[in-house]
Image: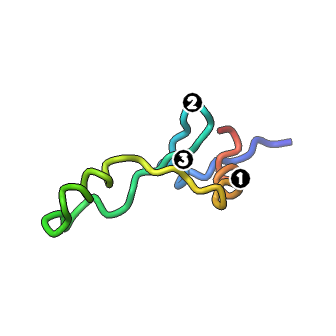
Amino acid sequence: MPKMKTRKCVSKRVKRTGTGKYMHSRAGSRHILTKKSSKRKRRLRQDGEIKKTEMKRIKAALPYG
């Protein structure tokens, strides 16, 4: 049986933690930052966790973790 291919678009956007959770960077932190509050920009710096509803798709896209 041939090797399974990794979805490269997902592997570039998602990283796996030591406990097995998948983290992503939050949207909205690239430009038009002057109108956003400091609190909002601080929150955007933190990585977000992938929701449980999306985990099936993520695990299928990354067969080797």
Q: Residue furthest top?
A: 18
Question: Residue 45: x percent and y percent?
Answer: 31, 49
Q: Please give left or right for residue 9 compared with residue 7 in the image.
A: left
Q: Are marks 3 and 2 in contact (CB under 8 Å)?
A: no
Q: How many marks?
A: 3
Q: Give the foreground label among 2 and 1.
A: 2
In the picture of the structure, the residue carrying the numbered disc 1 is 60
SS of the residue at dot 2? loop
Q: Are marks 1 and 3 in contact (CB under 8 Å)?
A: no
Q: Is residue 19 above or below residue 7?
A: above
| Disc 3 crowd, CA 10 A, few/some/many (<14, 14-19, 20+) | some
In the image, what residue type sits under mark 3?
A: Ser
Question: Residue 21: x percent and y percent?
Answer: 59, 41
Question: Residue 33: x percent and y percent?
Answer: 18, 63
C-alpha separation, residue under disc 3 versus residue under disc 2: 16 Å
> Viewer-proximal residue, 51 or 60?
51
Q: Residue at x 19, y 62 (%)?
A: 37
In the image, what residue type sits under mark 1?
A: Ala
Quarter of the image that includes the N terminus: top right
Q: Residue at x 62, y 37 (%)?
A: 20
Quarter of the image that includes the C terminus: top right
Q: Which mark is residue 11?
A: 3
| Disc 2 crowd, CA 10 A, few/some/many (<14, 14-19, 20+) | few
Q: Earlier in the sequence, mark 2 or mark 1?
A: 2
Q: Residue at x 23, y 55 (%)?
A: 39
Q: Which mark is residue 5?
A: none
Q: Please give left or right for residue 16 compared with residue 1 in the image.
A: left
Q: Give the foreground label among 3 and 2.
A: 2
In the picture of the structure, the residue carrying the numbered disc 2 is 18
In the image, what residue type sits under mark 2?
A: Gly
